[in-house]
């Protein structure tokens, strides 16, 4: 049976890859919604697909256009909704915390409270973050206590707690995914991996906050999209699922891998700066539940993923250089 799937935040890095996977692997009708105008193929993988006849895009802001968004959802009556829409950067959340809570908590409350009264929705996938746990020590499973270290993380933790109350009280058909640091071609240019590739090519210094000692768990975006699709299709309602690689890697090692692939010495392209406030020492979470119950596992090696990013930057260099390389805040 053909499904109608709405992807909120479809213009985001993670959202666009999920849309691409949906168009590649099914005959479902897909509707994308984001607050910004639809971007070009430089940042949207699905734009080159012949299956675009099954995709429609709407520009709507969850904060400014919520009544119109809810009207659209009721008119389209999707069976599945996947919500990537969020303010998702850590450092700027210290300057404008109210913007993060407005999108990640208040807008979500309006959306979910509306949807829980509708009968058309059968599955809702909420995209969270392991940053809700704070610094991850030992084996961090899905029932670990929430201990956020930044306004961004606190807003995501608040969203998760809000959603869990609707699951308990009303049987809202939600599932939650927490994936570790995603990367890949088409990622925001200010993120460490594309930024490192661009800076090496420009011969600009890459700043290693705290010397790059912080441990991250980088996982390729397509592996994450496969995991999210598995949860959407086969996950147990009300459950939380982790998506993570087999081991963590320091930011310094990440930049070293970029340097190796571009023929440069780490010492020549980096400089050490102070650590960011609220930076957690590690994001290493356990994904045993997802692997065991849904048959998921990551398949793209880190070196393969970095090679893809390098190739993407080279291929679209002129277009990429027409975009800002730093984070541009949008309230």
Image: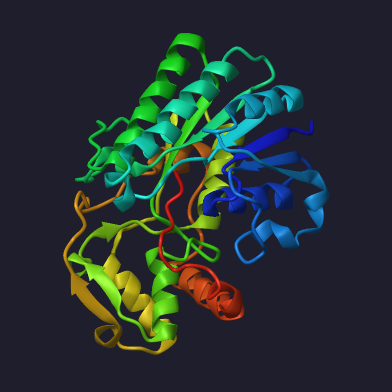
Residue in front for this viewpoint, 289 or 107: 107
Would you say 79 lies left or right of 313 here?
Answer: right
Would you say 157 lies left or right of 57 here?
Answer: left
Q: In which quarter of the image is residue 31?
A: top right
Would you say 318 lies left or right of 160 here?
Answer: right
Q: In this view, does 64 lie above or below 51?
A: above
Residue in front for this viewpoint, 13 or 58: 58
Residue at (52% x, 40% y) in the render: 85
Position in image of residue 120 (x %, y %): 69, 19
Position in image of residue 239 (x %, y %): 45, 27
Residue at (48% x, 28% y) in the render: 108
Q: Is residue 111 above or below residue 192?
A: above
Q: Quadrant of residue 149?
A: top left
Residue in front for this viewpoint, 177 or 66: 66
Query: Dividing the image into 4 quarters, which one contains the C terminus?
Result: top left
Position in image of residue 182 (x %, y %): 44, 56
Q: Is residue 182 above or below residue 241?
A: below
Q: Can residue 142 be seen in this view?
A: no
Query: Dividing the image into 4 quarters, which one contains the N terminus?
Result: top right
């Amino acid at each position: 049976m053909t499904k109608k799937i709405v992807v909120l935040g479809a213009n985001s890095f993670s959202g666009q890859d999920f849309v691409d996977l949906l168009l590649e692997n099914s005959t479902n009708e897909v509707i994308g919604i984001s607050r910004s105008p639809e971007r070009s193929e430089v940042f949207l993988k699905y734009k080159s697909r012949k299956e675009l006849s099954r995709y429609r895009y709407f520009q709507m802001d969850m904060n400014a256009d919520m009544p119109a968004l809810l009207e659209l959802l009721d008119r389209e009556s999707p069976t599945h909704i996947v919500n990537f829409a969020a303010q998702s950067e850590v450092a700027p959340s210290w300057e404008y915390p109210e913007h993060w809570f407005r999108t990640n908590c208040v807008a979500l409350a309006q959306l979910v409270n509306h949807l829980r009264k509708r009968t058309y929705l059968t599955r809702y996938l909420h995209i969270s973050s392991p940053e809700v746990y704070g610094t991850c020590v030992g084996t961090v499973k899905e029932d670990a206590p929430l201990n956020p270290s930044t306004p961004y993380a606190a807003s995501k933790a608040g969203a998760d707690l809000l959603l869990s109350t609707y699951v308990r009280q009303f049987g809202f058909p939600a599932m939650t995914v927490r994936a570790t640091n995603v990367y890949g071609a088409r990622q925001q240019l200010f993120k460490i991996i594309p930024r490192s590739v661009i800076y090496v090519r420009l011969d600009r210094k890459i700043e290693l906050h705290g010397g790059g000692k912080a441990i991250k768990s980088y996982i390729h975006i397509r592996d994450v999209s496969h995991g999210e699709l598995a949860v959407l299709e086969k996950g147990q309602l009300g459950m939380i699922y982790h998506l993570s690689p087999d081991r963590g890697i320091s930011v310094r090692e990440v930049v070293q891998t970029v340097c190796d692939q571009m023929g440069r010495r780490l010492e020549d392209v980096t400089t050490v700066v102070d650590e960011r406030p609220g930076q957690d020492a590690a994001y290493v979470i356990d994904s045993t539940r997802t692997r065991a119950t849904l048959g998921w596992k990551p398949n793209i090696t880190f070196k393969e993923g970095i090679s893809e990013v390098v190739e993407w930057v080279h291929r679209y260099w002129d277009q990429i250089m027409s975009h800002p390389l730093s984070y541009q805040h949008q309230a």
